[in-house]
């Protein structure tokens, strides 16, 4: 690993601290290294609307005169436009930093190379593409949103050792596959996503709150599909505690506080319509925790980017079969939590995205 790669790896590490709060902005990390080869400043983008990584890194430097003899490493191209904060490229120029190392170019149309060009026009040495693959993977959600005009989609379910996600509910109660530990990790995942979706049957049978009560973090926007608006009013989804969207074929106004109805055309495929709604509302990431039919519809229409499957050692021999993942998608990682296994699948993510 080269020196530039070492410090860019630190940028990536720092950037991940913004996972729960940076959206809809991308996660970005920055490191400032003096010519004597020691770090004098670090920062990351902690929250949308607040200072960017470069600003936080520069603010952390005790002696600003040292900036004139330093390199700033940034996982994503410094912005060149005025948004909620001033351009970071202008700040770097004003501080006299002579060298900038960039992980990857910003795919956002208002930046897209302009920040790099502004720095070079000011006489600054700019190196681009250090650990580019890792830096692009870091902002995978941001890239997916801006290139595919839809959220980054995670499908999640728990299943038995013999491939069932539920029994037939003959006794009215679901089979519980999760342990306290894996349940906590599911709530962590919820905190990392902007919205969460379930189908009508899951809402009716499980009465989920879809909250992050077992993990620190804000609750995601709740989404439920209820074609004919037949879900009962006592469900937790309608308690008004979290903003909730109900996708329906009816053109009605919701009588519940903090609950909105979104009318869809159920004669066609509703998934593209849901994606359009979420894109227009700037929802950058979506977690789907529905039943087998809903999950399989996402898989069959290729509306997914990542799949997490929790497999329990329990076998139930019959019931609702788990969704089928095409064989072309080989699992990426395997994690063991006690006797439970978690498999993670991801679609190939390259320059075509």
Image (cartoon, rainbow, N blue to C red):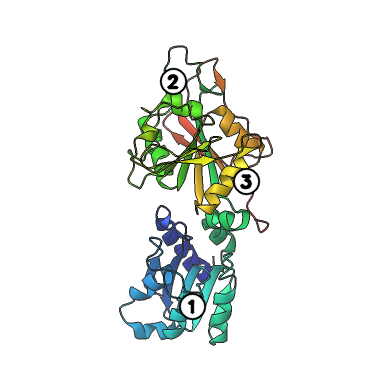
Q: Residue at x 34, y 42 (%)?
A: 215
Q: CA distance from mark 1 to mark 3?
A: 33 Å
In this rendering, the label closer to the viewer, 3 or 2:
2
Q: What x and y, as percent, mark residue 294?
A: 57, 32
| The quadrant where residue 133 appears | bottom right
Vertical order, 203 against 68 (above or below): above
Pointers 1 and 3 in contact (C-beta within 8 Å): no
Q: Mark 1, mark 3: which one is toward the viewer? A: 1
* Horizontal and vertical percent position of residue 143: 57, 58
Say whether residue 310 is visible. Answer: no
Is residue 134 visible in the rendered image? The answer is yes
Q: Which residue is mark 3?
A: 347
Residue receiving disc 2 = 174
Frontmost residue, 234 versus 336: 234
Q: Name the residue beneath numbered marker 1.
A: 89
Q: Residues within 10 Å of mark 3 (few under 14, many from 20)?
A: some
Q: Residues within 10 Å of mark 2 (few under 14, many from 20)?
A: some
């Amino acid at each position: 690993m080269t020196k530039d790669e070492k410090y860019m790896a630190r940028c990536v590490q720092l950037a991940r601290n913004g996972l729960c709060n940076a959206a809809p902005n991308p996660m970005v990390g920055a490191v400032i290294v003096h010519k004597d080869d020691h770090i004098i400043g670090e920062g990351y983008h902690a929250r949308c609307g607040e200072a960017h990584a470069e600003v936080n890194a520069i603010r952390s430097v005790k002696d600003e005169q040292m900036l004139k003899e330093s390199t700033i490493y940034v996982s994503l191209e410094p912005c060149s436009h005025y948004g909620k904060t001033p351009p970071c490229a202008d700040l770097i120029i004003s501080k006299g930093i002579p060298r900038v190392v960039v992980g990857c170019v910003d795919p956002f149309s208002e930046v897209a190379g302009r920040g790099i060009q502004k720095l070079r026009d000011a006489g600054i040495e700019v190196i681009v593409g250090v650990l580019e693959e890792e830096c692009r993977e870091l902002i995978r959600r941001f890239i997916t949103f801006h290139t595919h005009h839809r959220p980054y989609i995670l499908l999640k379910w728990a299943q038995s050792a013999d491939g069932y996600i539920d029994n037939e509910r003959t006794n009215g109660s679901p089979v519980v596959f999760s342990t306290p530990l894996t349940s906590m990790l599911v709530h962590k995942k919820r905190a990392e996503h902007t919205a969460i979706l379930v189908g009508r049957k899951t809402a009716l049978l499980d009465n989920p709150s879809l909250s992050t009560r077992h993990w620190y973090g804000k609750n995601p926007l709740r989404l439920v599909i209820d074609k004919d608006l037949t879900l009962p009013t006592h469900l937790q989804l309608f308690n008004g505690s979290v903003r909730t969207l109900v996708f329906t074929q009816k053109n009605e106004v919701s009588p519940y506080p903090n609950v909105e109805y979104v009318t869809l055309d159920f004669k066609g495929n509703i998934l593209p319509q849901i994606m359009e709604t979420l894109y227009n509302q700037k929802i950058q990431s979506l977690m789907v925790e529905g039943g087998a039919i809903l999950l399989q519809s996402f898989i069959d229409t290729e509306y997914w980017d990542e799949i997490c499957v929790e497999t329990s050692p329990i076998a139930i021999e019959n019931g609702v079969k788990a969704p089928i993942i095409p064989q072309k998608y080989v699992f990426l990682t395997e994690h063991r939590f006690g006797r439970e296994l978690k498999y993670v699948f991801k679609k190939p993510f390259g320059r075509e995205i």
